Amino acid sequence: MIEIERKFLVNSDAYKSEAFKKTRISQGFLNTDKARTVRVRLKGDKGFITVKGQSSKDGLSRFEWEKEIPKDETQSLLKLCEPTIIDKMRYEIEVGNHIFEVDEFFKDNEGLVIAEVELKFENEVFEKPNWLGKEVTGTIKYYNSQLSKAPYKSWGINL
C-alpha cells in the first residue's frame, strides 16, 4: 500500500489526442493534516474514500489506502469537506510501459495541468513524453490537498 509517483507540470495540450480515457473528477478533503489526508472522490459515477500518509522527504512515496464507496455516500461526504472542492478532468495516456494521469483543473485551479506517473520502485526508469514539463514531485503546493486550500488562481504572478 505504498504509492510511488512522480509529478510534472505539462507544457502543451498534446496529451489530449494521445489519451485512451478521460474522466471528470470532483474531490474534497475531510482532513488535510500533512501526516494524514482523508480524501473523498467522485470519479465518473464511482465514489472513493482514500487515506494517505505523510510523504517521504523527497516526496516520491507515501502510504495510500483506498476503498470504493456508494455514490450517494460520496456526495454526502463531499458536503462535509474542507473548502474548496477540486474539479478536474483526468486523461489517461499510455507511454511506453507506464500510464500517465494528466489532470486538467477547473474553477479556482483553472490553468493548472499536472501529470503523474506511478512507479513500482523509486528509481524506476520511464519514458518521458514531449508534453512533460518541469518536475514538481515533492513540491507541496501542487498536492491536491493544498490546491483545495490555496488554489492555483490565488498564487498570483510568482508561479
Image (cartoon, rainbow, N blue to C red):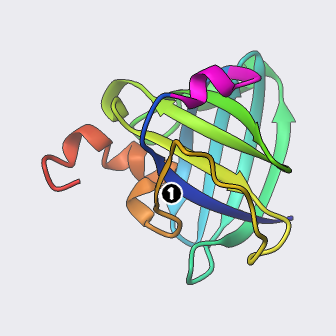
Q: Is residue 47 above or below residue 97?
A: above
Q: Quadrant of residue 94?
A: top right
Residue at point 71%, 18% (across, down): 44
Q: Which residue is mark 1?
A: 32
**Residue 86 seen in the current view:** no
Q: Is residue 52 above or below residue 133?
A: below
Task: Give the camera-side residue of 97 and 9.
Answer: 97
Q: Quadrant of residue 3?
A: bottom right
Task: Give the camera-side residue of 45 and 135.
Answer: 135
Residue 2, position as x, y percentages in the image? 81, 68
The magenta-colored residue range is 14-22
Q: Secondary structure at mark 1?
A: strand
Task: Give the camera-side residue of 72 and 152.
Answer: 152
Residue at point 23%, 53% (across, down): 159
Name the amino acid, label 1: Thr
Residue 91, position as x, y percentages in the image? 65, 29
Residue 77, position as x, y percentages in the image? 63, 31
